[in-house]
Amino acid sequence: MELVFFHIRHLVEIFFVQRQELLASLRTTSPSVLIVGGGINGVGTFRDLALQGVNTFLIDRSDFCSGASSASSHMAHGGIRYLENGEFRLVREAVHERNLMIKNAPDLVQPLPTTIPIFKTFSGLLNAPLKFIGWLDKPSERGALVIKTGLIFYDAFTGRQRSVPKHIFENRAKSLKKYPHLNPLVRYTATYYDGLILSPERLTLQLVFDGEAEGPHARALNYVSLSGISGDTVMVHDEVGNDELTLQPKLIINAAGPWIDRINRTLGMATRYIGPTKGSHLVLDNSELRKAIGDHEFFFENKDGRIVLIFPLFDKVMIGTSDIPVEDPDDVRCTEAEVDYFIEMVSRVFPDIPVTRKQIVYRFSGVRPLAYTRARNAGQITRDHHIQEDRAGKFPIYSLVGGKWTSFRAFSEQVTDRALGFLGIERKTDTQDLPIGSGTDAGLRLTPDYTRAEIAMMAEREKIVHLDDLLLRRTLLAYLGQLTRPLVGQMADWLGESLGWNEGQKNAEIQRCLEILADQHQARL
Ligand SMILES: Cc1cc2nc3c(=O)[nH]c(=O)nc-3n(C[C@H](O)[C@H](O)[C@H](O)COP(=O)(O)OP(=O)(O)OC[C@H]3O[C@@H](n4cnc5c(N)ncnc54)[C@H](O)[C@@H]3O)c2cc1C
């Protein structure tokens, strides 16, 4: 009981520690470890180091989970298609981690029935051997036999964890009975289970809170960027107070995802670890399609061989995604060509359900921080993760290259073990069976219709700096197309009351938010 009271008192304390006080305290005491990047990999490592009692400070130049981690397809998945590339280790690890996410964060990650419509029987049998000897750029369509083999492996990897049921195969007649709108050319459907991450943003935030709840040795701040290095001193810039701060950590963890090479350049090193590829999604308000898929994700091969998805997201449907090599991770948007592609692809599976541009309520794009390679087909680049170790001045720098949302815990554990070895500290706690949050995220209702008191609570506790933090990441209002101009105004009023904004600041926040919505999400209110 005493422990519970300590925990609650401690939580209350940290929620009220002011940004300025924290920044001031860093002027006198430097952290042992500086993590640059508040996406899932930086935050996962932050939590793990916090649990081991390591003095750690995490910064993000923007909000937590605003980079690649907010652009994901929301799948906690093993990646069945990577089996074809022979990546058994990756798939086994990711399936294991998927199961742990469902167990440890049940309010935010749920089992997701996933259906593959299959139009061929024997096709694709040679994909894997031809890829192995390097003769295949574009795989041929996967038929029933290839998919069945993959699913047998997939089930086997779930092993004794049994957190989701085994796959089933159904013939044409049964499939059409179950999904009357399905393309009648279908020969079979296979249904297996993965995980649905209801809100990647909330899950990331919860891990930040879990890390901070370990004690004052672990702190994380959004809107602080890494800006330079001079000898043994690292400079960080407070984007809110427009102030510079110097730190002298023992170790830097570069968890900047697609921006990893840029951070290394800031630290004086020329690296080329990342080969970024863009992926976009649309969120549709299409009740006919939503009803047709039920609560299943439809995961299938489009005419051009790309694996794409139609996904249930609350009362909306999410569709995606692309995989296009890009140069500048700051300059990605969902293009009209991508929109055409996504709209067209639905007709392969549900030909009689019309999809139009008018149904789009939200678009989003992000950049996968994949390991740099000369592979010609972006879909064949490995999604596995590894640490690149360098030195700038006296600091070792670990760059966290690649990875999937799903395997964040395992990657964080690997990074933390390396850091503990360097610092000469023993691991005290394992994260494998550790619940995320309380298991029931009390500060959260994922559906809209928030009350003023709830907004005030989020403002007080959830490190909100800008109006867009609230509308795009603490709530699902933007994602689900619930925003209207008056609602944005009302939210700005409520948030501004709690954060002490004057009229000028409030209007500037509204303007900033509308610009982000229009520019990055093509949502014009
Ligand atoms: C389209 C798409 C779909 C995907 N779908 C899935 C999926 O369904 N399932 C799955 O498992 N994985 C998926 N992934 C992969 C997964 O999302 C990423 O591998 C993962 O989110 C990478 O996280 P990260 O923390 O390494 O990078 P990020 O989330 O990008 O975090 C890096 C952070 O660094 C910050 N930063 C940059 N520069 C600075 C600076 N100077 N100072 C301080 N901070 C800085 C950024 O603001 C950013 O928040 C998908 C990725 C994409 C893009």
Image (tube, grey):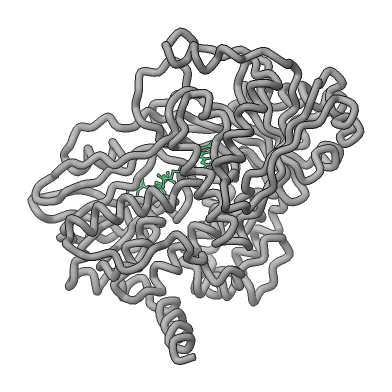
The structure residue drawn at horizontal position 52% and vertical position 18%, both measured from the top left corner, is 128
The structure residue drawn at horizontal position 57% and vertical position 27%, both measured from the top left corner, is 322
Q: Is residue 207 visible?
A: yes
Q: Percent position (x, y) of residue 495?
A: 57, 69
Q: Percent position (x, y) of residue 294?
A: 81, 43
Q: Percent position (x, y) of residue 333?
A: 53, 33
The structure residue drawn at horizontal position 77% and vertical position 46%, both measured from the top left corner, is 295
Residue at the extreme bottom: 2
**Picture quarter containing residue 127?**
top right
Q: Nearer the viewer, residue 344 or 155?
A: 155
Q: Nearer the viewer, residue 481 or 343?
A: 343
Against 278, residue 313 (above or below) is below
Asked if residue 283 lies left or right of residue 294, the reply is left
**Picture quarter containing residue 224?**
bottom left
Q: Percent position (x, y) of residue 503?
A: 54, 67
Asked if residue 112 lies left or right of residue 216, the reply is right
Number of residue marks: 0
The structure residue drawn at horizontal position 74% and vertical position 23%, both measured from the top left corner, is 118
Q: Is residue 472 visible?
A: no
